[in-house]
Image: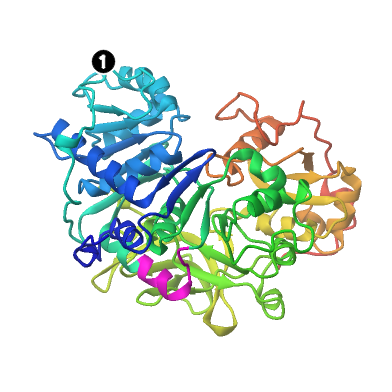
């Protein structure tokens, strides 16, 4: 099927057109029992795009996607891009007030909903009393969208586009939101130019092909979902939605679906391990295994590599402001452990075409360890609200640099290792403590699976709280294990066992929920007094404490 894809070589949706040409009758996407072919999805997206443009004749289209993902959400992404409009994923599980802020900040002028989106639409609309009524394409026809929202958008052959609209590299492809320190989400506009450089880099690195089946594990509001969609479609391969239950038997799910490319956060590894899915050669069909979003422990990499011996295993790194990922390290059993710091794999070298700086606490360049700052074609120019740029975007030598807030260290071969957030360091009884050091020291304690240590303020000082999964070990056992490698002053006074770590919608460990829980444990008012629910919730707050440091022989002092 000829689509003049060369005309769209710098457009994000040009990746789909390339897949369409390669594999028009192939399966573009599958979720549960649903599947859609490339030619069918192309036609559906053209129809939706035309209908949405007709519904917004006097305002530029900015498309909010109020769906849980799946084929409806993926179609909406493609339709918005075909219409030449930026797409704005909106998670129906978010509180209406947060959705209101996102819709307002992004300037959403029309919506696509599924059944879940329809259910929350009335509450969202009530939070938007002064906005014009929004046209709504209710893709799953649940009846939730109606006159209160605005004109119902109904695709029909007469309004369908003949071909996607042309875009320039400066045009916005999508707008995503990251957390804001003030409580206001930060809107990150990513352009077609940003994504064009990114996916060209990936094309040179990976050998994805039409017979590959790609996992889709991320919420659409997490930029890694764009990796899933447009790596799969750019190769003419199949995008496969991964339901929650698949993690309980990932080897069986992977085999039944011929899964060959896996991409998730490292937190998924612990879930699969607990379910018994990381036995040797359990995932023989995987060719690529990619992880992003959290510290990737070398132990987890080794376990996954044994389970997927034919797969290359990589640790990817990148904030949303640097377009999905900006570096990658390929795990090698004979090299990677020696490059790791605190048991965490390197993040690799920054992508070609970019420059990076390491800055000290005073904002001055340093050689070997400091805050990572990056400039280049994947760097966005700033947030939608310029007032939020302060402290994150730096103009230096006439170029815009993004300050990641992550402390990194240079290691052999020009690669970088992430040491944690620059603002994660806490001071405990006069000691400067990186919580990742505690987690690393506990990683090889028999019976411990995952750990996450956070620092919270208590009586004017910082206090460490360590959450752990695995066996419910006595506090004395954990403390004695830590004392083998860390000064007594660094031993947390509070440990809490969890059945599972709580995960957020992007399947990353929900650090904010654990901090809130830790604050309650040390007697501070929490931002959210409601108990943690879902994975990781443990009945009660049974939190034994370790005696004060004075109860142990102190044999280390900070200079």
Q: Position of residue 544 (x, y in %)?
A: 84, 36
Q: Is residue 392 magenta?
A: no
Front residue of 385 and 244: 244
SS at mark 1?
loop
Q: Position of residue 240 (x, y in %)?
A: 51, 49
Residue at the (49%, 45%) spot, across then down? 30
Q: Where 126 falls versus 233 (above or below)?
A: above
Residue at the (86%, 44%) spot, across then down? 471
Q: Position of residue 164 (x, y in %)?
A: 20, 51
The residue singled out by tag 1 in the image is 148
Task: Give the class, few, some or many, for how many residues have Cα within 10 Å of label 1's Cα (few <14, many ≥20).
Answer: some
Name the quadrant containing residue 418.
bottom right
Front residue of 480 and 159: 159
Q: Where 385 falls versus 401 (above or below)?
A: above
Q: Which range is magenta?
A: 198-210
Horizontal arrangement in the rendering, residue 514 relative to residue 82 (left or right):
right
The quadrant of the picture occupied by the N terminus is bottom left
Magenta stretch, overall SS: helix
Q: Where 246 falls versus 542 (above or below)?
A: below
């Amino acid at each position: 099927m000829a689509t003049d894809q060369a005309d769209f070589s710098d457009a994000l949706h040009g990746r789909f057109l390339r897949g369409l040409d390669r594999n028009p009758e192939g399966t573009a996407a599958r979720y549960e029992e649903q599947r859609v072919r490339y030619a069918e999805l192309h036609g559906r997206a053209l129809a939706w795009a035309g209908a949405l443009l007709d519904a917004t004749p006097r305002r530029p289209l900015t498309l909010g996607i109020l769906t849980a993902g799946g084929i409806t959400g993926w179609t909406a992404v493609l339709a918005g891009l075909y219409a030449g409009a930026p797409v704005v994923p909106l998670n129906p599980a978010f509180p209406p007030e947060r959705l209101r802020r996102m819709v307002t900040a992004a300037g959403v002028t029309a919506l696509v909903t599924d059944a879940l989106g329809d259910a929350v639409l009335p509450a969202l609309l009530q939070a938007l009393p002064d906005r014009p009524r929004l046209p709504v394409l209710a893709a799953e026809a649940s009846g939730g969208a109606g006159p209160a929202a605005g004109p119902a958008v109904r695709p029909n052959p007469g309004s369908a586009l003949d071909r996607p609209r042309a875009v320039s590299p400066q045009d916005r492809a999508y707008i995503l939101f990251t957390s804001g320190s003030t409580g206001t989400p930060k809107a990150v506009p990513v352009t077609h130019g940003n994504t064009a450089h990114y996916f060209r880099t990936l094309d040179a690195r990976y050998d994805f092909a039409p017979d590959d089946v790609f996992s889709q594990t991320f919420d659409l509001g997490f930029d890694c979902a764009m990796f899933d969609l447009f790596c799969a479609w750019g190769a003419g391969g199949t995008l496969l939605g991964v339901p929650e239950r698949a993690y309980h038997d990932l080897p069986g799910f992977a085999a039944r679906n011929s899964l060959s490319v896996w991409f998730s956060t490292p937190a998924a590894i612990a879930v699969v391990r607990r379910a018994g899915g990381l036995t040797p050669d359990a995932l023989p069909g995987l060719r690529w295994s990619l992880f992003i979003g959290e510290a990737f422990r070398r132990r987890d990499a080794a376990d996954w590599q044994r389970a997927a011996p034919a797969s290359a295993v990589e640790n990817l790194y990148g904030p949303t402001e640097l377009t999905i990922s900006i570096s990658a390290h390929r795990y090698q059993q004979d090299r990677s452990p020696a490059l790791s710091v605190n048991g965490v794999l390197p993040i690799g070298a920054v992508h070609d075409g970019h420059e990076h700086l390491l800055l000290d606490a005073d904002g001055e360049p340093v050689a070997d360890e400091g805050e990572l700052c990056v400039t280049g074609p994947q760097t966005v120019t700033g947030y939608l609200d310029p007032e939020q740029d302060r402290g994150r975007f730096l103009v230096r030598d006439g170029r815009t640099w993004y300050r990641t807030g992550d402390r990194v260290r240079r290691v052999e071969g020009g690669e970088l290792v992430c040491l944690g957030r620059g603002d994660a360091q806490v001071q405990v009884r006069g000691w400067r403590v990186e919580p990742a050091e505690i987690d690393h020291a506990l990683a090889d304690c028999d019976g411990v699976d995952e750990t996450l240590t956070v620092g919270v303020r208590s009586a004017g000082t910082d206090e460490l709280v360590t959450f752990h999964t695995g066996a419910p070990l006595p506090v004395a056992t954990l403390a004695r294990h830590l004392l083998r490698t860390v000064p007594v002053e660094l031993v947390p006074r509070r440990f809490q066992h969890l059945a599972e770590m709580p995960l957020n919608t992007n399947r990353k460990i929900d650090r904010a929920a654990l901090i809130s829980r830790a604050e309650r444990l040390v007697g501070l008012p929490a931002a959210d007094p409601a108990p943690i629910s879902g994975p990781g919730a443990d009945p009660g707050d049974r939190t034994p404490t370790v005696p004060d440091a004075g109860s142990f022989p102190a044999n280390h002092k900070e200079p």
